[in-house]
Image (tube, helix red, strand yellow):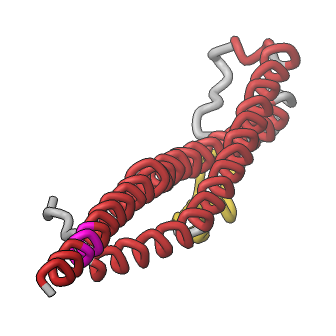
Amino acid sequence: MARLALSKASLHKEARQLTIYQRFLPSLDLKRKQLIAERSKARQALHETQARLTALQHIVGSELPMLADYEVGLEELVTIQRTELAEENLLGTRLPVLRAVQITRRAYSFLIRPHWVDQVQTLMTEALTLRVRIQVQQERLHRLDKAVQKITQRVNLFDKVLIPRTRENIRKIGIFLADGERAAVVRAKLAKSRHLDRG
């Protein structure tokens, strides 16, 4: 770190820096609060989606015990055809958004497979959609966590390092300049009294 120059120019420079830091700190703190609120919403949405998937698994377990019959082929009843993702910019953070999930349901003969396979296919479609949604929501939450961490570090830098350091620099320069002015006044009075003593 460069040595602090104890001059009026340096005092003005430090005062300008302090003004800039104090102007940016509230906006950074507001951004941090907004990101924390958005992270909380994302966490809640993820929790709700996971709860829906768990409820769906309980429905399958209670209403479809016949799934234990391994002789009925249920492979590839549903497959994910494609997922449509987009990105939104939230306060400078790029977040994934799930636009659509396209799932293909494989046709099967009603004479070969039992009647409950249709319900299994519907529940599997919903479960696949929920799993894709969970993956996107987890990525969204991960990015929000990183954004909150980064903005919190910036807020702390301004609040706990830059502003206090600049105030301390202003105080040091002010003390030095005040001491210099007092010394100049004392020297002037001494010179005047000497001048009067001689004259």
User: Quadrant location of residue 70?
Assistant: top right
Q: In the image, 36: left or right of 167?
A: right
> Measured from the top left, where is residue 19 in percent x and y?
50, 74
Res. 198 in view: yes
Q: Main secondary structure of the magenta part?
A: helix
State the residue at coordinates (36%, 65%): 174
Q: Tell me if residue 126 is in the magenta stretch.
A: no
Q: Quadrant of residue 8?
A: bottom left
Depicted 144 relative to depicted 86: above or below: above
Total labels: the figure holds: 0
On the image, the x and y values in percent for residue 118 come to 82, 37
**Against 50, is 130 above or below?**
below
Q: Nearer the viewer, residue 157 or 93?
A: 157
In percent of the image, x 63 and y 42: which residue is there?
Answer: 134
Task: Give the percent coordinates (x, y) of residue 182.
Answer: 31, 68
**Is residue 143 something that shows in the picture?**
no
Nearest the camera: 2 or 85?
2
Residue at 29% x, 63% y is 179
Q: Is residue 8 left or right of residue 89?
A: left
**Magenta stretch: residue 188 in it?**
yes
Q: Position of residue 135 (x, y in %)?
A: 57, 44
Please determine whether, in this image, residue 16 is positioned above or below residue 164: below
Which quarter shows the N terminus? bottom left
Asked whether 175 or 112 is in front, the reply is 175
Q: Quadrant of the C terminus?
A: bottom left
Q: On the picture, is 158 further left or further right than 82?
A: left
Question: Which contiguous range is marked in magenta?
Answer: 183-189
Residue drawn 65% across the image and 48% down it: 36
Q: Is residue 38 left or right of residue 163?
A: right
